[in-house]
Image (cartoon, rainbow, N blue to C red):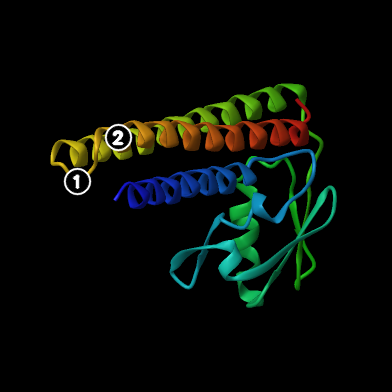
Amino acid sequence: MLTKILENATIRMEQVVDIFKKEIAKLRTSRASAAMVEDILVEHYGSRQPLKTIATVTAPQANLIQIMPWDKSAISNIEIALGKTELGGRPQSDGNMIRMIILPMTGERREQLIKILRSQAEQARVTLRQAREEAWREIQDKEKTGDLTEDDKYQGKKELDKLTRKFYQQVDETVRSKEGEIGG
């Protein structure tokens, strides 16, 4: 019983960290990345679709993103969608492919990105705490109903605290790495 509760808590915490990593991958760094643009919504055939579903997105150089749409009629809509972003570059098309040169970041923009990063990290920590609290409540309930012993309850609390610290460390390491990429 306790093992199942801890496994569920672990799965939930892993999901929180995975989502956090995916979200911060979208933050612009000093290096171009496909993740910066692949989720931008593009108007195509009457609906808004993520760019990655209608084109191949690559970053062949540190300051360049290339977008190769599968349907050439989507090029102008992709250019419009990219123009609305805050990436600091202008998309340029040759009729087959779009190239977007990413301009260097200003110091002010770096500070803004680091604030956003830290805010997202704190939100991830809050969600980790919520997952821990839910598992702890479940352990307490099982102990009250007699499904777990008091020793199991305290062992579960210890394990939950260890799990939470482990995932906090993953968030902190990810933040340090991303801050280095941003140049903060």
Nearest to the observer: residue 31 or residue 21 = 21
- State the residue at coordinates (53%, 27%): 119
Return the residue at label 2: 153
Q: Quadrant of residue 55?
A: bottom right
Residue type, label 2: Lys
Left or right, 94 with respect to 141, comes to right
Q: Quadrant of residue 166?
A: top right
The residue at 58%/35% (across/down) is 171
The disc at residue 64 is: none
* Quadrant of the snapshot with the C terminus: top right
Q: Is residue 99 left or right of residue 57?
A: right
Q: Which of marks 2 and 1 precedes in the sequence?
A: 1
User: Picture coordinates of residue 167 (x, y %)?
Assistant: 53, 38
Viewer-side residue, 75 vs 158? 158
User: What is the residue that sits farthest to the bottom in this orientation?
Assistant: 71
Question: Label 1 is placed on what type of residue?
Answer: Asp
Q: Is residue 105 above or below residue 81?
A: above
